[in-house]
């Protein structure tokens, strides 16, 4: 449960390529382990990827295509945890919530029933903005 006593760490997760989702996961996990109340707000492309079961797919933006194979190999060799694993671990070590934006579900043509099984809550943007107001850290990735 998110409380008012602990510093809130908020990430608005919009981009869904692996490199960006990896940052969302590692920052969220680290902040949760540090005792912060972590809220990950899933928007547009992250919702689409989650609904399609593609959260752990290692993909990169086109501008990094020349290095994608090497980086994917290194991630595997070094046994870097999957995005979903990091989210699960964050929930074990601290206060960590995944929130889906209800408007984003509609805009991206995503079935809310599918997404709701993988998040802590589906909320409208007004409720999200109220809940995240005054956060110690707010990032847009």
Image (spheres, rainbow, N blue to C red):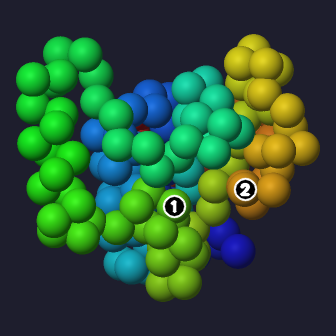
As measured in the structure, the alpha-carbon distance from the residue carrying label 2 to the one carrying label 1 is: 10 Å
**Element class at badge 2:** loop
Asked whether the viewer can see residue 1, the reply is: yes
Residue denoted by label 1: 84
**Element class at badge 1:** helix
Q: Is residue 20 above or below residue 15?
A: below
Q: Is residue 77 above or below residue 18?
A: below
| Badge 2 or badge 1: first in the primary sequence | 1
Residue lying furthest bottom:
93
The quadrant of the rendering that contains the N terminus is: bottom right
* Badge 2 density bin: few <14, some 14–19, many ≥20, Cα 10 Å: some
The quadrant of the rendering that contains the C terminus is: top left
Q: In percent of the image, x 82 and y 50: which residue is there?
A: 116
Q: Mark on residue 118?
A: 2
Instruction: Quadrant for residue 117, please give it.
Output: bottom right
Instruction: Quadrant for residue 118, please give it.
Output: bottom right
List x then y, in percent, for residue 45.
56, 26
Viewer-closest of 51 and 107: 51
Viewer-closest of 38 and 69: 69
Asked whether the viewer can see residue 6, the reply is: no
Q: In percent of the image, x 23 and y 61: which residue is there?
A: 76
* Badge 1 density bin: few <14, some 14–19, many ≥20, Cα 10 Å: some
């Amino acid at each position: 449960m998110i409380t008012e006593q602990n510093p809130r760490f908020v990430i608005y997760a919009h981009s869904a390529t692996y490199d960006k989702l990896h940052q969302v996961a590692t920052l969220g996990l680290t902040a949760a382990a540090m005792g912060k109340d972590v809220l990950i707000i899933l928007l547009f492309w992250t919702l689409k990827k989650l609904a399609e079961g593609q959260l752990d797919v290692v993909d990169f933006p086109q501008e990094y295509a020349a290095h994608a194979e090497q980086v994917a190999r290194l991630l595997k060799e070094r046994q870097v945890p999957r995005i979903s694993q990091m989210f699960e671990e964050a929930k074990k070590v601290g206060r960590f919530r995944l929130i889906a934006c209800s408007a984003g579900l509609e805009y991206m043509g995503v079935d809310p029933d599918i997404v709701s099984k993988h998040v802590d809550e589906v909320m409208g943007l007004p409720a999200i903005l109220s809940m995240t107001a005054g956060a110690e850290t707010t990032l847009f990735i």
